[in-house]
Image (tube, helix red, strand yellow):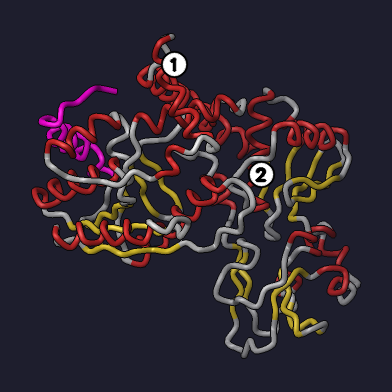
Amino acid sequence: MTNISSQNLSKYFNEKMKIFETEISGDKIGLSVSGGGDSIALLYLMHKWANKNKKKIFVATVDHCLREESANEVKAVKNICIKLNIECEILKWNNWNENGNLQDAARLARSELIGNWALSLDLNAVATGHTSDDQAETFLMRLARGSGVDGLSGMATSIYKNGMLWFRPLLECRREDLRDFLITNKVSWFDDPSNQNMRFDRVRMRKAQDLLDSIGLTTSCLTETANRMSVARNALELLTEEKIKNITEVTKMGTVKLDLELFKLLPAELQNRIYSHILKWISGSIYRPRFRSLLESLKNLLKGKAHTISGCHVITNGTSAEICREVSKITLSNNFSDEFDGRWILHSEMSKDQLNIGPLGEKGLGQFPEWRQLNISRISILGSPAIWKDDFLIAAPMMGMDNGWRCVLKKDSQNFYSTIVTH
């Protein structure tokens, strides 16, 4: 991290973009712009760079519909884009159910909204305005939660997520330098009042930074540590990817079989990583289980005790195991355009009126008295996709009863092994 004068910021940004250009496969780049100082600086820097390098940029700004002022703020962002001749779309999030962590929910919603917007425009990448201050705050928040190597590695400068490259060209810049740049160029921005609300973890960490500076825990120090953790994380992920291929098998039912005899020989860190990855992949969760829950589940796994955790059903005899989707967590759906349970793609030319997709379950299993001859675990069969009309079973493609329906596992073995490396 380097302090950069407002006069040199454009030059610095251009040098950074030369590096990112090797990752960006085309000329259409999206920007996430909130109206705050960081993202407004990103907008002006990227606009100047794009004009010089014959690139086309697009802007998305999200109205979280949580404050009365937010509607005017996103309109102001759009007006700036109109003056700069940049296409801008306002995206709205009004699905807050007032449960859980507001800032985390808003962040996830923002990422999903902008990701879908970028894919709809066939963009090649999306840039965000995260700074070194954000990196330091994230490090402190995760340190306070007792995070390990992965959590403390902080944000990457770029990452592929849901088929899109996301990159952070300002991640090594200080927030104050970006504001100096805006002031010098007579550009205004908005300050979100929630950034002063001490009930949010990030705000408390931001307020604590002055004290931390006085004892040597500067933003520079914290970001350098996060970067070193990132290097360690990458090495551990590559080693985990190598080991997991030798001890697991992804079945056609979307379950994962685990050789516990080989699993037991691995260091505890690799065991935790492999097992967490399996649980996340099966359940579709973006988060690992809480560490205590994970350790308790590992004990049951190695003792040969069947149990459930994080939307998964673990079958084990102490020497081998199979991790399946927990049937009770699979919800009925009449949406045939989306993946069922986030895992399966089902298709048929027949009318879907009054039909639902759900797990085969006990009711459906009774129609296959010879199921044991398939050499497939009972739990995985119970959780397999089935087409229902009320209580009448129309099709169970994974059991050979297709009746004109095709069923494909969206997340296959290639996806399982490749997604263990995140950076």
The residue tagged with tag 2: helix, strand or loop? helix
First in sequence, mark 1 or 2: give its number.
1
Give the residue number, with chain letter if any, for mark 2: 278
Count of marks placed on residues = 2
Quarter of the image where one finds residue 365: bottom right
**Relative image position of residue 38 (x, y in whole percent):** 29, 40
Side of 258 where 79 appears, left or right = left
User: What segment is highlighted magenta in the picture?
Assistant: 1-23
Asked if the magenta segment contains residue 74, the reply would be no
- Taking the spot 88% from the left edge, 63% from the top edge, the residue there is 372
Number of the label disc, if any, that sits on residue 324: none
Give the residue number, with chain letter if any, for mark 1: 211
User: In front of the other: label 1 or label 2?
Assistant: 1
Quarter of the image where one finds residue 101: top right
Q: Front-most of 300 and 88? A: 88
Would residue 234 be visible to someone looking at this image? Answer: no
